[in-house]
Image (cartoon, grey):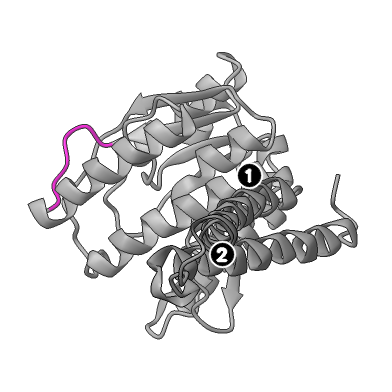
């Protein structure tokens, strides 16, 4: 009904991410009845990011809209999301489940996660992880989603050169089927993924700027501590002319030695990272 009211010819891609139930048979039946419905079946469960990446590669429409299959999102949001991409010139529009029907064990960590992501990415979105999103065709063809990075698609899009990101309040419904996969492990992993994404965006093409800088600083601090110990030893030998304290008796000796070792390792890590980066055909 939505397609007819907008006079558009949609393509519906249903992703079966290694389901063990009757999902694939249902998708095949729907596809047999309507040529606009297509299904893609993955051999095993690769996770949401992997399924989205395959779907993005197969999508052909000018506007690509993603929606989870748990029926917590309303299809009635599709026309406005599509309009915001085509008429308001947004490149990504993310849904905002302002009124949620999730337990506190999920909503409170989600608020903390969204706050941290806003501060790190400078993208003013209230709900980064909402599955209901709309994309311009160019966006889905130029970004890669892997691991658990589906939470950060707006961040990936911005750092890939698509800064026009909007938000729309969408209806959120109580879950009818299945159970949530959210847990503290995903909460912790989400922040680790955010740190990884931030590091890759800043230093992925120039790792020496990170490892080399802090490696040189660490080595310099350690060398300075070693020089102080040596000067102190020489002072006792040539001027005080008394038995000089043993170098190994000073904790500064071990701290300085450790700092120089860490500095050398970090510098070598940056150097090896530069070799890997420069041999990458997509380094630019």
Q: Nearer the viewer, residue 235 or 194?
A: 235
Residue designated by label 2: 237
Residue neighbourhood size for the residue with mark 1, other residues' Cα within 10 Å, grouped as few (<14), some (14–19), many (≥20): some
Rounded to the nearest angstrom, the CA distance separating label 2 from label 1 is: 53 Å
In this rendering, the answer to whether 199 lies above or below 269 is above
Element class at badge 1: helix
**What residue is drawn where x is 60% and y is 33%?**
158
Which disc number belongs to residue 201? 1
Q: Quadrant of residue 163?
A: top right
The answer to whether 76 appears left or right of 28 in the picture is left
**What residue is drawn where x is 58% and y is 27%?**
7
Q: Nearer the viewer, mark 2 or mark 1?
A: 2
Where residue 32 appears, x then y in whole percent? Answer: 58, 68
**What residue is drawn where x is 58% and y is 84%?**
43
The answer to whether 17 appears left or right of 209 in the picture is left
Element class at badge 2: helix
Residue neighbourhood size for the residue with mark 2, other residues' Cα within 10 Å, grouped as few (<14), some (14–19), many (≥20): some
- Tell me which secondary structure the magenta stretch mostly adopts: loop
Q: Nearer the viewer, residue 273 or 14?
A: 273
**What residue is drawn where x is 54% and y is 54%?**
228
Residue furthest left in the image: 104
The answer to whether 95 appears left or right of 258 in the picture is left
Q: Is residue 100 magenta?
A: yes
**In the rendered image, is residue 31 in sight?**
no
Where residue 244 appears, x then y in whole percent? Answer: 47, 69
Q: Which residues are magenta?
A: 97-102
In this rendering, the answer to whether 169 lies above or below 224 is above
The image quadrant where one finds the C terminus is top right
């Amino acid at each position: 009904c939505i397609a007819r009211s907008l006079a558009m010819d949609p393509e519906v891609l249903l992703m079966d991410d290694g389901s063990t139930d009757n999902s694939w048979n249902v998708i095949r039946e729907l596809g047999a009845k309507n040529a606009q419905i297509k299904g893609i079946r993955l051999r095993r469960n690769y996770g949401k990011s992997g399924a989205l990446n395959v779907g993005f590669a197969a999508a052909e429409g000018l506007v690509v809209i993603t929606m989870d299959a748990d029926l917590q999102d309303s299809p009635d949001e599709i026309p406005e999301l599509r309009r915001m991409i085509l008429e308001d010139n947004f490149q990504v529009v993310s849904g905002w489940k302002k009124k949620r029907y999730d337990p506190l064990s999920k909503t409170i960590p989600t608020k903390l996660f969204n706050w941290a992501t806003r501060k790190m990415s400078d993208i003013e979105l209230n709900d980064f992880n909402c599955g209901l999103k709309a994309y311009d065709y160019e966006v889905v063809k130029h970004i890669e989603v892997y691991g658990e990075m589906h939470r950060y698609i707006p961040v990936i899009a911005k750092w890939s050169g698509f800064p026009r990101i909007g938000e729309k309040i969408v209806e959120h419904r109580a879950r009818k089927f299945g159970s949530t996969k959210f847990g503290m492990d995903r909460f912790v992993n989400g922040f680790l993924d955010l740190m990884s994404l931030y590091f890759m965006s800043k230093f992925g093409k120039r790792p020496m700027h990170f490892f080399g800088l802090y490696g040189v600083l660490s080595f310099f601090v350690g060398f300075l501590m070693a020089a102080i110990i040596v000067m102190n030893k020489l002072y006792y030998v040539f001027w005080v002319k008394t038995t000089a304290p043993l170098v190994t008796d000073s904790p500064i000796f071990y701290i300085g030695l450790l700092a120089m070792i860490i500095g050398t390792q970090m510098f070598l890590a940056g150097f090896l990272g530069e070799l890997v980066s420069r041999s990458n055909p997509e380094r630019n």
